[in-house]
Image (tube, coloured by chain):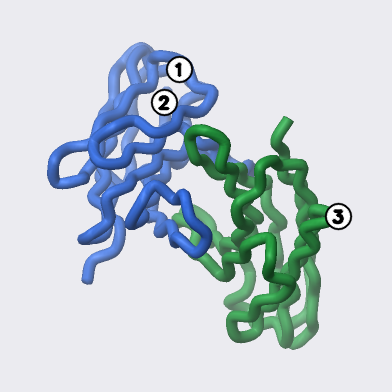
C-alpha cells in the first residue's frame, strides 16, 4: 500500500533555532518527492521538489534531503522565524498508469518568540 | 499573473444538498487536480483532469464528480452531502499531467465547505 508517514506530528521550537522534519514513504513506482508549507486554512505552497537521483535541494533556509534507497526524506529549517509556523507536508508522486500524489499528514511546526 | 483561483472561498450547505466548487488554473496550465483536506489531516486526492479528460481518480464515492472545460477551468460536484464531507477542498494546476520530474503543481487557497 502506498503510504507517506511524517514525524514528529507536531513540534515547538524557539525563534532562531534549527529543526528537522522527517518523511518516510512506501510508494512505488516513485517519481518525485515534494515538501509543501501550508498555513492554516490556506493552500499548500511548494518548497522543494526532488527526483530519485537528487540527494539534497535547498530553498533559502529550507534544505531537503532524499535517500531513495531507504525511502526517507528530511526537511531542515535553519534559523527559524515566527513566519515558519505552519504545517509541512511531504508529498510523493506515483507514476503507475494514472499519475497522482500521496500526501503525508504533515508536521505542525510552531515557532515561539 | 493570477495564480490558481477557487470559488467560493467558504460555503455552508445542509445534509442531502448538492454543491459545485470551481477552479481556474494558472494561464497556460492544462492539468487540474482536486483534493479534500479534512481538518488536521493531509489532502486526499480526488480527481485529476488533463485536456478535459479524467486522468486519475482517488477512493471517493460516486457522489463526487468533476469535469474540465475547454478553457481548462474545472468544477467539482458533490451530491447528497454528508456531514463528513465538511473539509477544505483544494485545487491544483500544472502545465502537464505531472508525468515528468520537475513538473510543479500550484495550489489554490481552497474552498472551505461546511455541511450542517
Is disc 3 on the same chain as disc 2? no
**Residue B41 lies in what quarter of the image?**
top right
Q: Chain of mark 2?
A: B
Q: Which residue is the site of mark 3?
A: A70
Q: Name the residue rendered at 58%, 48% in the picture.
A: A93
Position of residue B103 measured from the top left corner of the image (x, y, whole percent): 45, 60
CA neighbours of label 1 inside 10 A, class few (<14), some (14 to 19), many (20+): some
Q: Spot the blue chain and give its letter.
A: B
Name above or below for residue B73 compared with residue A78.
Answer: above
Question: Label 3: chain?
Answer: A
Residue at the disc numbered 1: B82
Q: Residue tagged by mark 2?
A: B115
- Horizontally, is B25 left or right of B114 in the view? left
Can residue A28 be seen in the rendering of this structure?
yes
State the residue in front, B23 or B51. B51
Position of A56 relative to B107 (above/below): below
Disc 3 packing (10 Å; few <14; some 14–19; many ≥20): few
Q: Earlier in the sequence, mark 1 or mark 2?
A: 1
Chain containing the residue with disc 1: B
Q: Residue at x 46, y 28 (%)?
A: B57
Horizontal side of A55 relative to B10 (left or right) equals right
Between tags 1 and 3, which lies in front? 3
Amino acid at each position: 500500500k502506498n503510504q507517506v508517514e511524517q514525524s514528529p506530528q507536531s513540534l515547538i521550537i524557539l525563534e532562531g533555532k534549527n529543526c528537522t522534519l522527517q518523511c518516510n514513504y512506501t510508494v512505488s513506482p516513485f517519481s518525485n518527492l515534494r515538501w509543501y508549507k501550508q498555513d492554516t486554512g490556506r493552500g499548500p505552497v511548494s518548497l522543494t521538489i526532488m527526483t530519485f537521483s537528487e540527494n539534497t535541494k535547498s530553498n533559502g533556509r529550507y534544505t531537503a534531503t532524499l535517500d531513495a534507497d531507504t525511502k526517507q526524506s528530511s526537511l531542515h529549517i535553519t534559523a527559524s522565524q515566527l513566519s515558519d509556523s505552519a504545517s509541512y507536508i511531504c508529498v510523493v508522486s506515483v507514476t503507475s498508469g494514472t499519475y497522482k500524489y500521496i500526501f503525508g499528514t504533515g508536521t505542525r511546526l510552531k515557532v515561539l518568540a | 499573473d493570477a495564480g490558481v483561483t477557487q470559488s467560493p472561498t467558504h460555503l455552508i450547505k445542509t445534509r442531502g444538498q448538492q454543491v459545485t466548487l470551481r477552479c481556474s488554473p494558472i494561464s497556460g496550465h492544462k492539468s487540474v487536480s482536486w483534493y479534500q483536506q479534512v481538518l488536521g489531516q493531509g489532502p486526499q486526492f480526488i480527481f485529476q483532469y488533463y485536456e478535459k479528460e479524467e486522468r486519475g481518480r482517488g477512493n471517493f464515492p460516486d457522489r463526487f464528480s468533476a469535469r474540465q472545460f475547454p478553457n481548462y477551468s474545472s468544477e467539482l460536484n458533490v451530491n447528497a452531502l454528508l456531514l463528513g464531507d465538511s473539509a477544505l477542498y483544494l485545487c491544483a494546476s500544472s502545465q502537464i499531467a505531472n508525468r515528468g520530474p520537475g513538473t510543479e503543481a500550484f495550489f489554490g487557497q481552497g474552498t472551505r465547505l461546511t455541511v450542517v
